[in-house]
Amino acid sequence: MIPAAPIPMQQPPAPRWQMLWREAVRDPRELLTLLGLDALASSLSEAAARQFPLRVPRGFVARMRPHDPHDPLLRQVLPVLDEERVVPGFGLDAVGDTAARRGGGVIHKYNGRALLIATGSCAVHCRYCFRRHYPYAEDTAAAAGWRDAVALIAADPSLHEVILSGGDPLSLADHKLAELTDALRAIPHIRRLRLHTRLPVVLPERVDAGLLAWLGGLPWPVVVVLHANHANEFDPAVDAALARLRATGASLLNQAVLLRGVNDDAEALAALCERGFAAGVLPYYLHQLDRVAGAAHFEVDDARALALHAALGARLPGYLVPRLVREIPGQPGKTPLTGL
């Protein structure tokens, strides 16, 4: 009797968010066609798109205004010729990450906190990203099962908070995130976990049952620092995702970047703060642009930034006004902008 052939093991289907990730728009011309903006093709930079490729989830594209070349969401992701300009003062390492690297994907800049470059992957490539030139292939914490990063944190009892950044840490699968937090549980001096992530905004499907189970089972207070720059980035799907995050007990904050042509007017900034709060998110930081090569066309000068911040303070209650800050390499924390 011939033995029956073994039944091949079937791989479980990928989570929906991973499928949507794979379907992201990667061709700048396709993006323009989807928005009825083919005439903008002459403004595209092939060099910028090669160096830092376009990636934007289709759900985020759906929030862009068709036929509007000035749409604030489109401007954040479209690789344009302005990125090719070489501008003095704009470099590859705008915030001093290189000097603060400790190996194992760990960056240690500030007292009591260790930031982990969890991964180099993001669901969206923002053109002003201060890590667009970061050497992710050399230094990510998830490599080698997080062992080097966890060892560095365990060896330093002054570290009380672990910050997961990247890239975007929520681009990792749930089991990879659990590998890290399972290892961190054995370190008695860890008191808080912080996630810096854009995924709940640009790909809200990421906030699924698996992620929520992981978050809800963590032994520390969790702070989720989101990144949205304009009120139009919020929609009912994002609202629902943020409600699910809050239900785990996580605190939600938002950090935005002041960007010319995106949110550099008081009305847009006030709408962002109000809309985020309506979704359960407190404003945290409004960053002056990190001066990374390729992003000079987004810069807003300090005098205008201070005037906009003052206008926000005049129209909003204090708890809705983010701190206007700049990151200066070598400083012990973010530097508030309080005057010229």
Image: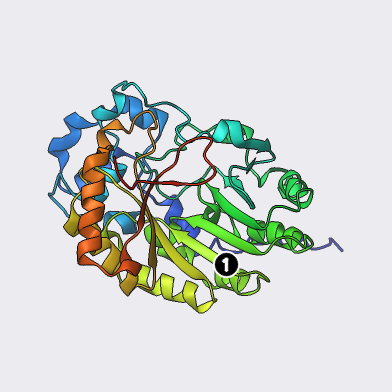
Q: Residue at x 37, y 43 (%)?
A: 126
Relative to the observer, which residue lies in front, 149 or 162?
A: 162
Residue 309 drawn at (x, y percent): 26, 53
The residue that mark 1 highlights is: 222
On screen, residue 240 above or below 132: below
Left or right position of 185 against 200: right
Residue 83 at x, y percent in the picture: 30, 29
For the N terminus, which image quadrant? bottom right
Q: Residue at x 71, y 58 (%)?
A: 179
Q: Is residue 254 rendered to the left or right of residue 72?
A: right
Secondary-structure class at tag 1: strand
Furthest residue to the bottom?
247
Which quadrant is home to the C terminus?
top left
Residue 219 sits in quarter = bottom right
Residue 87 placed where, x, y %? 31, 22
User: Going 55% across and 60% down the picture, which residue do you hit?
Assistant: 14
Q: How many marks?
A: 1
Looking at the image, is 220 positioned above or below residue 146? below
Q: Is 86 on the left-hand or right-hand side of 91? A: left
Q: Residues within 10 Å of mark 1 (few under 14, many from 20)?
A: many
Residue type at tag 1: Val
Please indicate, yes or no, whether residue 170 appears anywhere in the rendered image. yes
Question: 301 or 298: nearer the eye?
Answer: 301
Expressed as whole percent of the image width and height from the top left, the position of residue 26 reads 36, 42
From the viewer's perspective, is 4 left or right of 142? right
Which residue: 63% across, 32% down?
A: 138
Residue 276 visible? The answer is no
